[in-house]
Amino acid sequence: RQFSGTTSRARQLAAFAPYRNDPDRLRRPDTLLFGAFESGLPSTLAGVGALESTLGVPLPIIQFYAAWGDKPEQQFPLRIVRAISDYGSVPMITWEPWLSDFDNSLHPTLPPRNVREQKGMSAVAGGQYDFYLDKWAKAAVSFGKPLLVRLGHEMNDGYRYPWGPQNNERGEYIAAWQHVVGRFRAAGATNVLWVWSPHVAYEGWQLYYPGDEYVDWTATGALNYGPIAQWSSWWTFEEIFGKRYAELAAFGKPVMIAEFGSLSVGGDRAVWYRDALASLAVDYPAVKALLFFEVEGDRTITYQSLDWRVRTDSAVVAVVRAAGLSSPR
C-alpha cells in the first residue's frame, strides 16, 4: 500500500525499526508514535490500511482487544501479532481479565462462574490462573518482538468491568498486576511492555499504580461522547485529558492516549480534533503515543450504536492531514 505519493509504507516506517525490534527503545521513545484500534481487528488489517491511506501516513502502533478465557479467540493471538509485526508496526493488546469465561469442566478447582469475579484479582494474585498466564507468556516469548500489553484497563471504574472496585480491593488489583508481570518475566517474556491505563475521570486513580518496576507506560482514554447520555457533555480534549496530564506524567513513564476520539453530536468535531492535535507537542510533551479509536457500531457504553470513525468524516480527515502526522524520524 502506498502513502505520500510513491513512498511505500516500509520506507516511511524505516525510522521506526529500532522501536519495533528493541523493547528498551520502546520504553524510552523520543518521538510521538501514532496508532489505532480499528473495529475489524483482530480478524483483519484491511481497515487499518484504509485508515492509513485516508490519513496519508502509516501507523506504528496497532491495538486490538482480547479477553481471558478458554475459547480459541482468547488464546494468545500469535497470528495477528505476527501479521502486525510483518506489516511494520508494533502490536498492542488490551488484555481483559473476564474470569467468568473459563469453563468449570476444564478447571474444576476454580470457583463457580456466578461467584468467580468476586475477589477475582486476589485469585489471580494467588496463582489460580497461572495455567492460562503461563501459556500466554510462553507464546509471547515465541513471538519474540516488542509487544505492548494494556492489562485490566480502567480498573478504578466501579461500573463497567468485573476487575474493578465493585469486586476487588485496590491492593488485590495491584497484587494481581504484579503477579501477571512476574509470571511473564519468569518465562523470559522480557519483550512484553506493560501499559497501565486507569480511568482518570474517577478520583483516586493514582492509588492503583502497581509500581515503577511493573509499569512501562502510563495511559488513559480521551473520548468525547458529547451529550449522548445524562452523564456526558461536550468536553474538549483539555477538559478530558489536560487536567490529569501532569499526574500521569509524574510517574516518569511515557504517556499514551490509548483511545482517542470524538463523536459528532453536540459540537464541532473537526475543531475538537484540530485543537487536540495542535496541543500535543506544546502542552503535553510526555505523551509519546496516541491511538485513534476507529470504531463503527460501538455499543459498550450505551444502547446506541456509536460511530467514532475518522476516515468517513471528510472534515475531520482534512484537519488530521493538516496537523501533519508523521512517521518516527
Image (cartoon, rainbow, N blue to C red):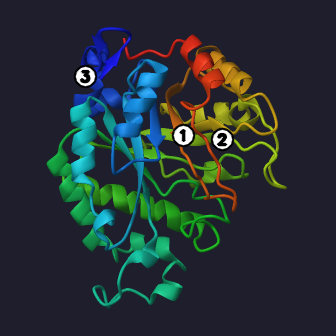
Residue reaching furthest right?
A: 230
Return the x and y of residue 105 as percentages of the image width and height: 31, 90
Q: Residue furthest left?
A: 142
Query: What residue do we see at 62% from left, 36% from top?
Result: 261
Q: Which structural element holds mark 2?
A: strand
Closer to viewer: mark 3 or mark 2: 2
Q: Earlier in the sequence, mark 3 or mark 1?
A: 3
**Residue 285 lies in quadrant:** top right
Percent from the top left, x then y, of residue 129? 33, 73
Graded by Cα atoms within 10 Å as few (under 14), some (14 to 19) or many (20 or more), the crowding at tag 2 reads many
Whether pointer 3 and pointer 1 mark residues with C-beta atoms closer than 8 Å, the reply is no
Which sits in the foreground, 51 or 128? 51
The quarter in which the N terminus is drawn is: top left
Residue 257 in view here: no
Q: Position of residue 103 (x, y in %)?
A: 35, 83
Q: CA distance from mark 3 to mark 2?
A: 30 Å
Q: Which residue is mark 1?
A: 293
According to the picture, the residue beneath numbered tag 2 turns out to be 223
Q: Residue at x 41, y 69 (%)?
A: 125
Task: Determine the secondary structure under disc 1.
Answer: strand
